[in-house]
Image: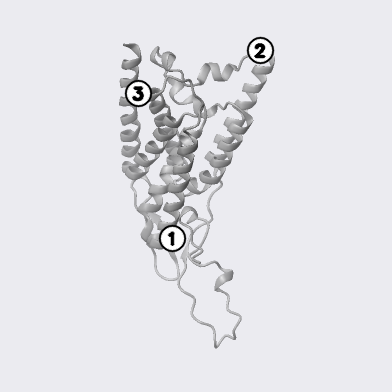
Amino acid sequence: MNNQHPEDYSYSDPGDSESNVSWASPHQQKPVPPQVSKPRPPLPLVTYTLMGLAIAVYLLQMLTQSVFGVDVPAQLGMKINQLIAQGEVWRLITPVLLHGSIIHIAFNMYALYLFGPRLESSFGRWRFLALYLIGGFAGNVFSMMFTDAASLGSSTAIFGLLGAQGVFIYHNRKIFGEQVSKASLSRIIQVAVINLIIGLSPGIDNWGHIGGLLGGIIFTWLGGPLLEVQGIHPHHHLVDRRETAQIIQAGVVAAGFFLLLAIGAVVLVNR
């Protein structure tokens, strides 16, 4: 089994250090293939901050429900088409901080914990934050376009991370290896399909999931990391060839596309 995983290239080497140890005598040892050196990934501060904010807001939701009998944060921030059309445009992004139950937030925070640190290490903090917000925004725009139901939850942004993971692996399949990349992409597609099927259940905003998925795909396709190996043996290392200007342009294009869709949705609601 190849123990290099595309989804965590910043965490593992092409060959695990223990798996390359030979217990034969020095004269019998085979040469160890060159390793691609990678720095230890930084602490995923953005991921942990997003998790902390969502948990803090959920505690506030429970507190206001207990004290006032109404979920004040949800009333002020969840996606409600008519209120967005009347000018409360923050409702196209604030739902990513809101959740409807302990199971809801637990599932989403677990997914963010799984995907967030690896993608944040690969994308960098600011690009990862842009990815998360674009996914959340895109999902809520799609939800506004295709359903009148009020909605809340960070699953729009989580699906954006899922789409980004797939594009990231596809773009860097030569680095990770074709077979490993195909297997990883197959797993990501399976996860997306299963969750979209589950999303057909009543009470789940599947349009938000689809929109978030598309937002993550578009942004990462245009501005995600493009890795290449640089350096001279044995000091190889991975670098990202994507320029800052390209990343900014990707954010503008992705956010601008869904902004245009949002404007169209507002026009339709106000007719």
**Badge 2 amino acid:** Phe
Image position, residue 227 (x, y; %): 38, 55
Neighbours of disc 3 within 10 Å: few (<14), some (14-19), many (20+): many
* Residue 139 in view: yes
Q: For the residues marked 3 and 2, what is the alpha-carbon distance in whole angstroms?
A: 33 Å
Task: Name the amino acid type tagged 3.
Answer: Ala
Q: Residue furthest right?
A: 67
Q: On screen, 121 above or below 139?
A: below
The quarter of the image holding the C terminus is: top left
Which structural element holds mark 2?
A: helix
**In this figure, which residue is indicated by the disc labeled 2?**
68
Q: How far apart in space, not on screen, are marks 1 and 2 (Cα)?
A: 53 Å
Image quadrant where residue 231 sits: bottom left
Which of pointers 1 and 2 indicates the residue nearer the eye? 1
The reply to whether callout 3 and callout 2 are in contact (CB within 8 Å) is no
Question: In the image, what residue type sits under mark 1?
Answer: Val
Which label's residue is closer to the chain start, 3 or 2?
Answer: 2
Q: Pointer 2: residues within 10 angstroms few (<14), some, or many (20+)?
A: few
Q: Earlier in the sequence, mark 3 or mark 1?
A: 1
- Image quarter for residue 27? bottom right
Residue pictured at 42% horizontal, 36% vertical: 130
Sooner in the amino-acid sequence: mark 1 or mark 2: 2
Residue assigned mark 1: 180
Q: Residue at 49% x, 76% y: name it.
A: 32
Residue 195 sits above or below residue 241 on the image: above
Say few, some or many: other residues with alpha carbon within 10 Å of mark 1 (under 14 / 14 to 19 / 20 or more): some
Q: CA distance from mark 3 to mark 1?
A: 38 Å
* Image location of residue 257, percent across then percent down: 31, 31
Residue 188's place in the image compared with 4, above or below, is above
Q: Are marks 3 and 1 in contact (CB under 8 Å)?
A: no
Would you name the residue on which mark 3 appears? 262
